[in-house]
Amino acid sequence: MAVDTARGGGTASAPPKGTARPSGTADGTPPAGDGGCACTDCPHGVREGRRRALAEFRRRRDELAAGAGVPAALAHSPGASRQWVSDELTQAARTVAEHTRAEAAFRLGGLWRRTAAAVWGAVALLLAGQAVTAVLGAGWTTGRTAGLAAALVCAAALTAAALLHRARGGVLAPVTGEDGRLSTSRTVAAVWVLLASYSVLVVAVGLALAPGADAPTRLLAGLDLGRGAGLLTVLALCCAVAVTVHRIVALRVRAQRLQKVRADRPRAADLLTDDGGRGSFADVQYVAVCSVAAVLAAVRLARRPGELPDLPWGLALLVAISALTYLAGKYSEGGRPVILSVVRSREVGDLDSPIRTGDDIEIRGSGFVPPGAEAPDRLARTTVRIGAVHVHVPLVPVAGGFANPADTVLTVPVPVDVEPGRVEVQVITAAGVETNRYSIDVLD
């Protein structure tokens, strides 16, 4: 019964004997009358299925960490019981991963509506702001009409793009990287492209609506290079950074100098964090500086809608320094995993001896768990090559997490199929990156 519970990823209550998938029916839906939605084609049902599977996995992990639930036939063999526990948790982790992917697909598919609503919400805020300033100021002007018309054009274009890419997150599709996360460099560049395009549209609409014979000449003068040089410089710099970062990341991943694990779906926090969810100084400062510069450009455009925003060169230089810092951070992040040493794992009371087949070895180094690969199903992908034999690193549960594998230490058994003599040890991480080869002596 315990085995079936772990593999099914069902509810926390004990299932009837012989139930193969206690979380619900054969297709993974929660059972009727269990207090949750039983649908598999609606967001609520998918979300409830993931919640149940995750709760069952955590319960099962903590139970096995406390030593309960292991079959009596395996209790006499630490190696066999550890492998059984690892297999059980791996199966349960895969069930959770399936539910997580299903939920992410539903979220991503419905994201385009929310992004389109956010775009039109911004247009409504612009209209409200213009109405308030018109009442408090000199009334409704041609510049306000041009700004609103340009906003409607941009919103219509973004909505069409969101509908076209509705399966990939709508408006967020162009700024989402190949790893499924929001790209900081692409997002910043997209903001400046949108701001520059909106500025030109405002001038264009104003040119079409402006009364008087000298109005077209005055509006066209607002597009002179002398006025928009700062904006164009920042725009070119941010676009170049986005392209360069994409190239740097691609080359480093192919050269196995950077580990990338795909995310389930894009999140807003991706703009300020690394792949592991930790705050990144390079990303935070780049977003902060560019946001301040974009706000200043928007204020300049609001005050003078008939010309491109005039960014001071001091602010453009500040953006350039921030962009160089961001580039340097991207080039220096990550690194290839490395094995520093391999020793025989010794239990308390055990005698010191050479490494033999059947013994546990402790691999010490760094980078064994890539950022973003902390999920149990991805931890289970970590593999060690000992000679010609591939050994999957067993999951060793502790309360609230796992003791093995870890980012700096892996513990694996030496299989009996390993030929005695000098063999090489190599770790293959969940991202598919291989470490250096480390030679050890295995005795018969």
Image: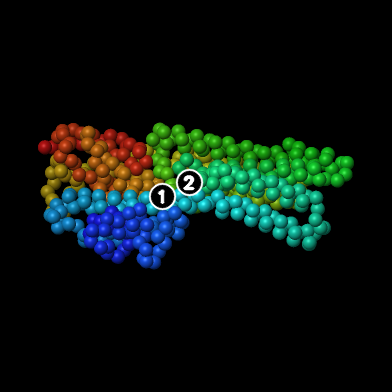
Check disc 1 and report its element: helix, strand or loop.
helix
Residue in view at x 40 percent, y 43 percent = 261
Residue 28, percent from left and from top: 35, 55
Q: Where's residue 427, x and y in %? A: 29, 39
Is residue 137 or residue 36 the one in the foreground? 36
- The part of the image, by quadrant, that contains residue 251 is top left
The amino acid type found where label 1 is placed reads Arg
168 on left or right of 94: right
Q: Which mark is residue 181?
A: 2
Q: Residue at x 26, y 43 (%)?
A: 392
> Which of the 4 image quadrants contains residue 334?
top left
At numbered mark 2, what does the secondary structure look like: helix, strand or loop? loop
Left or right, residue 100 beside residue 351: right
Figure quadrant of residue 310? top right
Q: Which residue is mark 1?
A: 101
As drawn, the label of residue 92 is: none
Residue in front for this viewpoint, 351 or 372:
372
Crowding near the residue tagged with mark 2, few <14, some 14–19, many ≥20 C-alpha atoms within 10 Å: many
What crowding class fits label 1: few (fewer than 14 Cα within 10 Å), some (14-19), or many (20 or more)? some
